[in-house]
Image (tube, rainbow, N blue to C red):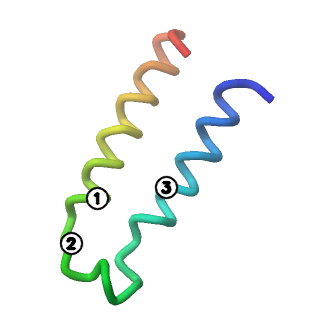
Amino acid sequence: MSLGTILLIILILMLIGVLPTWPHSRSWGYGPSGGLGLVVVIIIVLLLLGVL
């Protein structure tokens, strides 16, 4: 497996984890998904630049 495939799998699992579908996470707002979105954007830019 390449590093890109492993990162893609981890990002998909993280996206599922930040969905506010469980009662304990409904009051968190956009914090977790916003932070994950920032990580996704950084990884996409690094992939486009050929760093990863």
Which quadrant is home to the N terminus? Answer: top right
Q: Which of 51 and 31 is in front in this view?
A: 31
**Residue 1 vs residue 34: left or right?**
right
Q: In this view, does 3 lie above or below 50?
A: below
Whole-angstrom CA distance, mark 1 to mark 2, is 7 Å
Q: Do the residues labelled 1 and 2 touch (CB within 8 Å)?
A: yes
Dot 3 surroundings within 10 Å: few (below 14), some, or many (20 or more)?
Answer: some
- Which residue is found at the position 25% from the left and 53% from the top? 34
In the drawing, what numbered circle is on residue 14?
A: 3
Q: Where is residue 5 in the image (x, y as percent from the top left)?
A: 70, 35
Q: Mark 1 points at which residue?
A: 32
Precedes in sequence: disc 1 or disc 3: 3
Of the image marks 3 and 2, the number of the one nearer the N terminus: 3
For badge 3, the amino acid type reads Met
Give coordinates of residue 33: x percent, y percent.
Answer: 31, 58
Q: Quadrant of residue 38?
A: top left
Q: What element carries label 3?
A: helix
CA gap between label 1 and label 3 equals: 10 Å
Report the amino acid beneath label 1. Answer: Pro
> Which residue does the image show at 45% across and 30% down from the upper left?
44
Residue lying at the far front in this picture: please name it.
24
SS at badge 1:
helix
Give the numbered dot on residue 46.
Answer: none
Q: Foreground residue, 34 or 27?
A: 27
Residue matched to label 2: 28
Residue 17 location, x and y as percent?
47, 65
Amino acid, disc 2: Trp
Q: Which quarter of the image is occupied by the C terminus?
A: top right
Q: Which residue is drawn at 47% across and 59% down?
A: 15
- Image vertical order of residue 16 relative to residue 39, above or below: below
Label 2 Cα neighbours within 10 Å, binned few <14 / some 14-19 / many ≥20:
few
Q: Which quadrant of the structure image shows residue 41?
A: top left
